[in-house]
């Protein structure tokens, strides 16, 4: 980080502190100041015991009017300075049918049958998958099970429609919200953008906001031999989620969460390596794939540090904020010669649950280390990676659903969602639980309903792939449950 960028970071942190202190002053102390002012005015009025009520009113009329105007102006300013609340009413994660499940061995076998991979490329994908943290029942679209693979616009739309409508139908059924009441629809899918758009397929009039997160892998399975592109074959899987948002104050009574803070960090303009660390491109043979640079972890770390510089003042206790700010200033003034190590605040002092994008085992390991999180904090992310693989942005909602299914969410708890994406981007959202979420003994666990009792499981650093018995004969092999080849915690 150069001096100019560090100066901007310090300046932004100072602004965030000032903004936070202002809102704390107005939100917490203004009502007390107004109350004291009114009491003093009342005491002054009551001190003139020998004066008649009419004389008292005439004597203090101007003062009372002035106080009332001040109170009204302060109340109005306070109300206008507060953002309109955003509630998360409910969420639903999509779980594909069992016919879409594949063991790791079956995935490798199908890659071998479908693509023009060299023996070296197949061995590399096998090694990567053994270290990926994925389980034995992740999902693929039917198009990639076909021989030859059916990678076309039609099958890509079939995959996305199954995921999008599956998640949306479950969400609307859970909430009882008529489709006509949905006024805003947001659909994010970075690798597949058809015309007409996803949003146009599900848009409605009126007031709720429907957010659909998914990814499409039908057209994005890589069939070449360029190693940086082979990694995605071992991580990305079929999946999606739908979330219902509302800014109706009446929804607070049944909403699960309220949005407290969002912070978006985009470092595409910071350096070429940030922009180029995740790209979709053609290899030398014309095969399209997503290339992951070796610098991805370093770029992600830089983006996270920038993001938490902005998020920290919004959520951390004052003691943690001062330690962090002092470290930044000392490093800015004295440089590395002072021997001042970067201070990473203790976010567990302010946040209860962590939903970290299940991009891969390396990402989760690095964030567990750098944020000093426990295995309990990392469990939702690791089990999402294990059970569903990398489902892009929807992984955050699978993780929140996992917390709910395990009965972890209590009223007042704060949830930090951390997402990463190409560009390079790091985004944070902090939610506050408005009520204790009843797990319903698994009945309302959604995509986790069949697996939640068997989880968590211990996933070793390397899990050798055991070939299916009938894989050589072209059969599907036996389906494995979520806890195959691992032991319970």
Image (cartoon, helix red, strand yellow):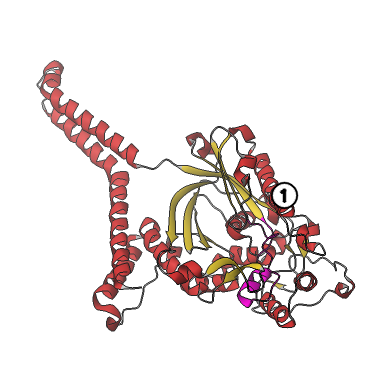
| Among the 4 quarters of the image, the one containing residue 472 | bottom right
| Residue extent of the magenta highlight | 214-239
Question: Residue 386's spot in the image, x, y percent?
Answer: 67, 67
Q: Nearer the viewer, residue 71 or 22?
A: 22
Queried whether the magenta region covers residue 222, the answer comes back as yes
Query: Residue placed at 20% from the left, 36% from the top?
Result: 37
Report whether residue 301 is seen: no
Instruction: Locate residue 172 relative to residue 83 in the image: left or right.
Output: right
| Among the 4 quarters of the image, the one containing residue 238 | bottom right
Prevailing secondary structure class for the magenta stretch in the rendered image: loop
| Among the 4 quarters of the image, the one containing residue 279 | bottom right
Query: Residue placed at 22% from the left, 39% from the top?
Result: 36
Q: Nearer the viewer, residue 354 or 197?
A: 197
Instruction: Locate residue 111 relative to residue 265 in the image: left or right.
Output: right
86 to 350, vertically: above or below = above
Instruction: Locate residue 65 relative to residue 233 in the image: left or right.
Output: left
- SS under mark 1: helix
Which quarter of the image is occupied by the N terminus? bottom left
Q: Nearer the viewer, residue 48 or 158?
A: 158
Queried whether the magenta region covers residue 202, the answer comes back as no
Question: Residue 199's spot in the image, x, y percent?
Answer: 60, 44
In the rendered image, the residue lying farthest to the top is 54
322 to 183, vertically: above or below = below
Question: Residue 76's spot in the image, x, y percent?
Answer: 30, 34
Instruction: Locate residue 417 relative to residue 213 in the image: left or right.
Output: left
In the rendered image, the residue lying farthest to the right is 473
Question: Residue 267's spot in the image, x, y percent?
Answer: 43, 64
Query: Residue placed at 68% from the left, 80% from the top?
Result: 124
Which residue matches tag 1? Answer: 162
């Amino acid at each position: 980080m150069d001096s100019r960028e560090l100066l901007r970071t310090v300046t932004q942190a100072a602004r965030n502190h000032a903004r936070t202190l202002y809102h704390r002053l107005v939100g917490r102390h203004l009502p007390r100041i107004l109350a004291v002012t009114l009491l003093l005015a009342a005491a002054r009025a009551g001190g003139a015991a020998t004066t008649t009520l009419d004389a008292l009113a005439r004597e203090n009329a101007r003062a009372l009017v002035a106080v009332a105007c001040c109170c009204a102006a302060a109340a109005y300013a306070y109300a206008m300075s507060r953002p309109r609340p955003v509630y998360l009413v409910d969420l639903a994660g999509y779980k594909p049918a069992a016919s879409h499940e594949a063991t790791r061995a079956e995935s490798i076998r199908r890659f071998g049958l479908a693509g023009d991979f060299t023996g070296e490329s197949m061995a590399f994908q096998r090694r990567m998958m053994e270290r990926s943290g994925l389980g034995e029942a992740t999902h693929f679209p039917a198009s990639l099970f076909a021989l030859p693979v059916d990678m076309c616009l039609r099958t890509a739309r079939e995959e996305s429609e199954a995921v999008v409508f599956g998640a949306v139908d479950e969400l609307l059924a859970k909430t009882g919200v008529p489709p006509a009441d949905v006024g805003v629809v947001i659909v994010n899918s970075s690798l597949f953008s058809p015309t007409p758009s996803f949003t146009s397929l599900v848009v409605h009039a009126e007031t709720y906001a429907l957010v659909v997160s998914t990814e499409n892998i039908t057209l994005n399975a890589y069939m070449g031999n360029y190693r940086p592109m082979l990694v995605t074959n071992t991580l990305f899987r079929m999946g999606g989620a739908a979330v219902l948002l509302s800014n109706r104050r009446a929804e607070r009574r049944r909403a699960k969460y309220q949005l407290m803070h969002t912070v978006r960090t985009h470092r595409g303009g910071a350096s070429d390596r940030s922009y180029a660390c995740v790209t979709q491109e053609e290899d030398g043979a014309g095969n399209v794939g997503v290339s992951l640079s070796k610098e991805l972890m370093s770029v992600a770390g830089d983006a996270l540090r920038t993001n938490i510089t902005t998020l920290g003042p919004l959520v951390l206790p004052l003691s943690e904020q001062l330690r962090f700010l002092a470290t930044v200033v000392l490093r800015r003034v004295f440089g590395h010669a002072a021997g001042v190590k970067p201070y990473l605040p203790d976010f567990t002092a302010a946040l209860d649950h962590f939903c970290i994008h299940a991009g891969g085992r390396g990402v989760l390991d690095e964030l567990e280390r750098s944020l000093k999180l426990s295995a309990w904090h990392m469990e939702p992310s690791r089990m999402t990676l294990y059970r569903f693989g990398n489902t892009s942005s929807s992984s955050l909602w699978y993780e929140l659903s996992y917390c709910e299914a395990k009965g972890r969410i209590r009223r007042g708890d704060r949830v930090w969602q951390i997402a990463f994406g190409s560009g390079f981007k790091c985004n944070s959202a902090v939610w506050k639980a408005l009520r204790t979420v009843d797990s319903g003994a698994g009945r309302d666990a959604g995509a986790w309903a069949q697996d939640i009792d068997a989880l968590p499981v211990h996933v070793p650093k390397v899990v050798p792939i055991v070939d299916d018995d009938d894989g050589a004969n072209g059969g599907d092999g036996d389906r494995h449950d979520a806890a195959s080849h691992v032991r319970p915690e």
